[in-house]
Image (tube, rainbow, N blue to C red):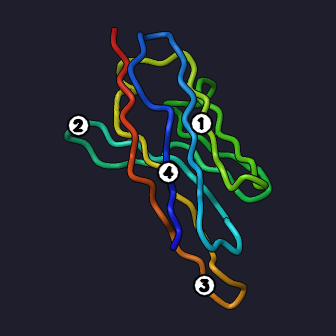
Amino acid sequence: QVRLVESGGGWVQAGGSLRLSCAASGSIFAINDMGWYRQAAGKQRDMFASITSVGTTTYAGSVKGRFTISRDNAKNTMYLQMNSLKPEDTAVYYCTADIALGWRNPSRDYWGQGTQVTVSS
């Protein structure tokens, strides 16, 4: 059984910072790409940052220069440092990871339960 657990969400004023974590646990053989999605009220869930197993990162234009994605492969954990937060960053933030349970098993995507980030103006 594999679980992804996010932590670090909360309330912050505009211009502030938050750091999210996403910890994977269970019978994990390998974690490939990992990423962060967010879903604002009434909107679709969109990916805005991703990181490969070797640390190559991509960002959506809306967060580039303000957010930094990283991972610690030894801890099976991914992080999201969010700086210069804006009210439009308010959303539920989800982490996802492409995980293989064994070398013969195809990998598949797993999701965290989501964590609320609220940025007040």
Q: Nearer the viewer, mark 4 or mark 1?
A: 4
Residue 84, how many percent across, how many down? 54, 15
| Position of 93 relative to 75 (above/below) | above
The earlier-in-sequence mark between 3 and 1 is 1
Q: Earlier in the sequence, mark 1 or mark 2?
A: 2
Instruction: Determine whether 15 is above or below 99 in the image.
Output: above
Q: Which residue is mark 1?
A: 80
Q: Which residue is mark 2?
A: 41
Check disc 4 and report its element: helix, strand or loop.
strand
Q: Disc 4 marks which residue? A: 5
Marks 2 and 4, the one that precedes in the sequence: 4
Give how far across and how far down residue 92 sits, in percent.
35, 39
Q: Nearer the viewer, residue 47 or 5?
A: 5
Q: Amino acid at mark 3?
A: Pro
- Which amino acid is tagged 1? Leu
Task: Point out the tag, 4 or 3, that comes first from the N-terminus.
Answer: 4
Residue matched to label 3: 106
User: How far apart, in angstroms, are the residues tagged by discs 4 and 3?
Assistant: 22 Å
